[in-house]
Image (spheres, grey):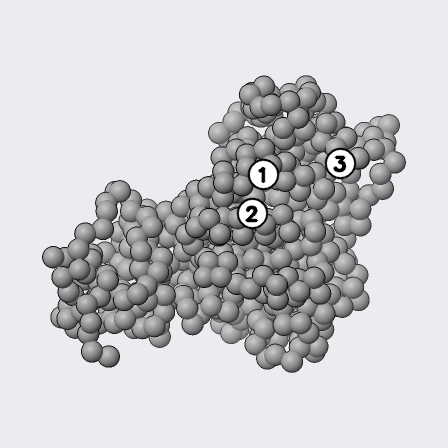
Amino acid sequence: MDPIPADLVFLGGQVLTLGGGRRAQAVAVVDGRIAALGTANEVGEWIGPGTEVVQLHGRALLPGFVDPHTHFGMTTFEPVAVDCRIPPLRDKHAVIDAIAAAASAAPVGQWILGLGYSSRNGRAPMELLREDLDVAAPENPVCVVDLSVHCAYANSAAMRLARLTKETPEPDGGYYVRDAHGEAAGTLWERAMDTIYGMSLTGLTEAYGEDAVAELVRQNSQRHLALGITSVADAAVTPEAARVYRMADQRGKLPMTLHEMRAGPGFFAEPDPIAQHEFLQSSPPTTRLLGGTMKMFMDPVFPRNAGYQVHPDGTKERLGRPYYQPERAGALAAEASSRGLQVAIHCLGTWAIDLAMDAIGEAIRESESADQRHRLEHFTTPTYEQIHRAAGMELTVVTQPSFFYQGGEKSAERLAESGIDAPPAPLRRMIDEGLSVALSSDFPCGPLAPLAGISSLVSRQTRGSLEPVAAEEAISAAEAVELYTIAGARSMHRETEVGSIEVGKRADVIVLTHDPTAVDPTMLREISVEQTYVDGLRVFDLYGRTATASG
């Protein structure tokens, strides 16, 4: 292709293309796509009077990070929610005070949403009781979502709106914590939180209005773009969240690509493959909003996940309770696959991992497509045999380095006590087995920054241990970057569009202060994202600079 004046040219950098290991020094962009890459002299021929030229001065140019598992819809509401994290708040009492302050400033009857509280943040559980929230907000319904996203706390006003009484039965796959008199104490586990959490988001959307909520989507996008993330997947999209995304997209408030992994009518509810297929037919993808994935939950967090205790004689004791019986899980996965949907199954514990692979096995048998790339989400405590099995089934694992960083040394002890032969985050083994792996944040359950996650898997250091944990499972920085870019794109069937810097692909690229493959692993967290581009347009600049043309 003969050079034509480019819209954008990057010169004088370390270009990590992630395309077959090739490196370059310069890149040209035309109409939002990569038009050329090579040396500065080669790409310099594309510079014309109106070309914006970015002098990299040795900095690194990478494809934008792809995060294939977040909870973008939940974090969109953070600016209008109460920050319930400890820290920065001191303790449970400070959380209650913050909720009281928000309620006093809100109209009577308006929902109060809290995010980030963790009852496990301390030596003993610190559940927010219904009575605590009643005192804080006597005239407003309150829903506080636990940091795990698998539990919520509600006050009496919220429970009245949800018609939750002493006689309300436990939902299948959920549990209402009750007091000594059998009354719901306000702590809602798993599917038991679906109704109240969904009502809180609907209530806030109505209170603030569609334009304001669309602006919240834009602000959340900007937070991701500032960290170099140009594509995400929301890992549990309800009908209400889907409506919010369309509101934002139609108003031009979605400056990044978002892939919807559709859940059921509630966050944890059983999905309907037929309804999801019909929705895709009636609501086709746009440039920014994509779909085609059905999300299922196989095991809970509360009271524990579905795992094995492996005894010295090799026998396995099942612990916990999965969401689905094997027959039902297999039927759902098979129905989804037969309709062309990718199936993604949340599985934390070893038993849940087996059940998820069994269900996907049914999906594979039903499918006419050889390339649906069904996914195992989290895959947190696999055995070596399960890694081998997943690789043989050609599944995709989407796992979270932040889980390892937040407590890998403790996880190693628990896994050993449970008789599980693999250590936490066995990435080296997964890659060597040929398993398709992508990295993600699961934000807000873990930190959002990709470079922080990459650092922990390369150094094998955790928040609680400077000594490497299971050092034999370390991967290189180059491998980790690939897992957060092209591998993430591949997990969403988007590797022909994004994930690497190759001619013809979308110019979703980022400028980093340093080449992450050329620094000490302990310094990876110190690398900054200076600029982010989507379709060749600068959407973030660390220093607030504006684009300038060469002439």
The image shows residue 292 at horizontal and vertical percentages of 58, 65
Q: For residue 74, which quarter of the picture?
A: top right
Picture coordinates of residue 225 (x, y %)?
Answer: 39, 50
Query: Please, what secondary structure does the residue beneath circle 3 have?
Result: loop
Instruction: Please tell me whether mark 1 or mark 3 is closer to you in this view.
Output: 1
Q: In the picture shown, does residue 382 fall above or below 132?
A: below
Indicate which disc, 2 or 3, sits on the residue closer to the N terminus: 3
Residue to which mark 3 is pinned: 162
In the picture, the quarter occupied by the C terminus is bottom left
Residue 374 vertical position relative to residue 267 in the rendered view, above or below:
below
Q: Is residue 205 above or below residue 500?
A: above
Answer few, some or many: residues within 10 Å of disc 2's Cα (few below 14, many 20 plus, some between 14 and 19): many
- Viewer-nearest of labels 2 and 3? 2
Question: The disc labelled 2 sits on which kind of residue?
Answer: Val
Q: Which residue is mark 2?
A: 244
The N terminus sits in image quarter: bottom left
Compare residues 448 and 459 and report the one nearer the observer: 448
